[in-house]
C-alpha cells in the first residue's frame, strides 16, 4: 500500500526523532509525491529514510543493522512456514488479558505488575521496545500515555504494521517506528518510561541496549 494511504507522523513524534546515522535532531518530513513515497530527510547529513506500511524506517543500513534485518526476515519466514498468513488471524485487542494459553498467562501476570509500577495518570511519554504488533502500546495509550512503539519487523500480517488495525479497533493512537533498540533514533531525555516485554533476549549487546534506553530516559525515568 502506498505511504499516502496512512496518516502522516504526528508532530510530537517528529520533535523527538534523530537521524540514526549522524544523530542530528528532527529530520524533516517530506510528504509523498507522485514519484515517491513519504521520506524523512536529515537536515545535517542529508540521509533519507523511507516508510513501510506508513511506518518510518529509521535505521542506519550498515553491518550492525544487517543482523536485525535477518531477525526480521526470520520472523516472517517462520510465520509463513506455520501457515499463519493463510489463517488470517484477527487482531485480539484484549491480549494479554484473559488468555488461557502460555506464554500469555505468564505475560498477563507480569504485565499487571508492570502497569501497577507504571501507575499511568495520563500524559506520560512511553517507549515500547520490541513492540511486536503493539499490544502493550495499545493499553498504555488507552490510559492516556503518549506512546511510541518500536520494532524491527514492519510486516502488516504479524508485525508492527498490524498495530494500525489495533488502533482502529480500540480508537487509540500511538506512534510506530522501525529501528534499532541498541541505537534508538530518539533525542536524549525523550521518555518518562521505557518498557519491554519478552523483547530483550534476542539482543547480542545488552550493554548497548541499556545505554541506549538510559540515554532516551528523562531524569528520574524508569525502565520497566
Image: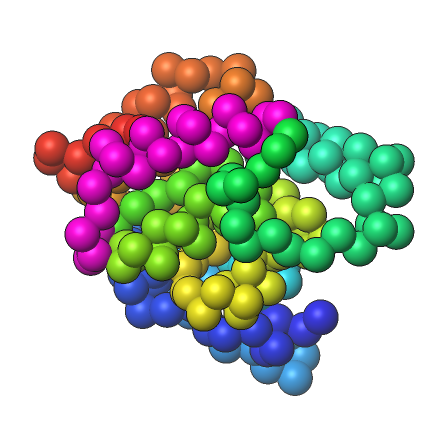
- Front residue of 119 and 210: 119
Q: Quadrant of residue 163?
A: bottom right
Q: Is residue 123 magenta?
A: yes
Report x, y in % for residue 168.
53, 69
Q: Residue shown at 17%/35% (left/top)?
A: 221
Q: Is residue 97 left or right of residue 174?
A: right
Report x, y in % for residue 2.
68, 73
Quadrant of the rendering where the C terminus is positioned: top left
Q: Quadrant of residue 5?
A: bottom right
Q: Is residue 120 magenta?
A: yes
Q: How many marks?
A: 0
Q: Residue shown at 48%/65% (left/top)?
A: 170
Q: Is residue 55 above or below residue 110?
A: below
Name the magenta segment's main secondary structure: helix
Q: Residue shown at 67%/79% (left/top)?
A: 35
Quadrant of the rendering where the N terminus is positioned: bottom right
Q: Quadrant of residue 29?
A: bottom left
- Front residue of 63 and 84: 84
Q: Residue shown at 63%/43% (left/top)?
A: 153
Q: Is residue 194 above or below residue 49?
A: above
The furthest residue to the left? 219
- In this picture the colour scheme is rainbow
Report x, y in % for residue 208.
39, 21
The magenta region covers 102-124
Report x, y in % for residue 12.
29, 64
Q: Is residue 215 visible?
A: no
Q: Is residue 126 visible?
A: yes
Q: Is residue 124 left or right of residue 103?
A: left
Amino acid at each position: 500500500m502506498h505511504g499516502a494511504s496512512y496518516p502522516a507522523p504526528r508532530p510530537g513524534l517528529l520533535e523527538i526523532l534523530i537521524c540514526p546515522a549522524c544523530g542530528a535532531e528532527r529530520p524533516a518530513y517530506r510528504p509523498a509525491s507522485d514519484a515517491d513515497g513519504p521520506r524523512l530527510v536529515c537536515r545535517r547529513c542529508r540521509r533519507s529514510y523511507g516508510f513501510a506500511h506508513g511506518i518510518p524506517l529509521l535505521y542506519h543500513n550498515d553491518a550492525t543493522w544487517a543482523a536485525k534485518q535477518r531477525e526480521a526476515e526470520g520472523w516472517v519466514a517462520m510465520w509463513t512456514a506455520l501457515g499463519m498468513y493463510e489463517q488470517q488471524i484477527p487482531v485480539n485487542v484484549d491480549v494479554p488479558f484473559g488468555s488461557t494459553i502460555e506464554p500469555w498467562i505468564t505475560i498477563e501476570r507480569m504485565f499487571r505488575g508492570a502497569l501497577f509500577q507504571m501507575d499511568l495518570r495520563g500524559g506520560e511519554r512511553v517507549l515500547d521496545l520490541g513492540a511486536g504488533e503493539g499490544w502493550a502500546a495499545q493499553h498504555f495509550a488507552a490510559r492516556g500515555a503518549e506512546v511510541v512503539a518500536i520494532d524491527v519487523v514492519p510486516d502488516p500480517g504479524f508485525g508492527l504494521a498490524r498495530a494500525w488495525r489495533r488502533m482502529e479497533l480500540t480508537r487509540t493512537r500511538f506512534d510506530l517506528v522501525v529501528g534499532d533498540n541498541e541505537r534508538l533514533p530518539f533525542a536524549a531525555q525523550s521518555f518518562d518510561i521505557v518498557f519491554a516485554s519478552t523483547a530483550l533476549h534476542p539482543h547480542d549487546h545488552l550493554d548497548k541496549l541499556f545505554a541506549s534506553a538510559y540515554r532516551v530516559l528523562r531524569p528520574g525515568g524508569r525502565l520497566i
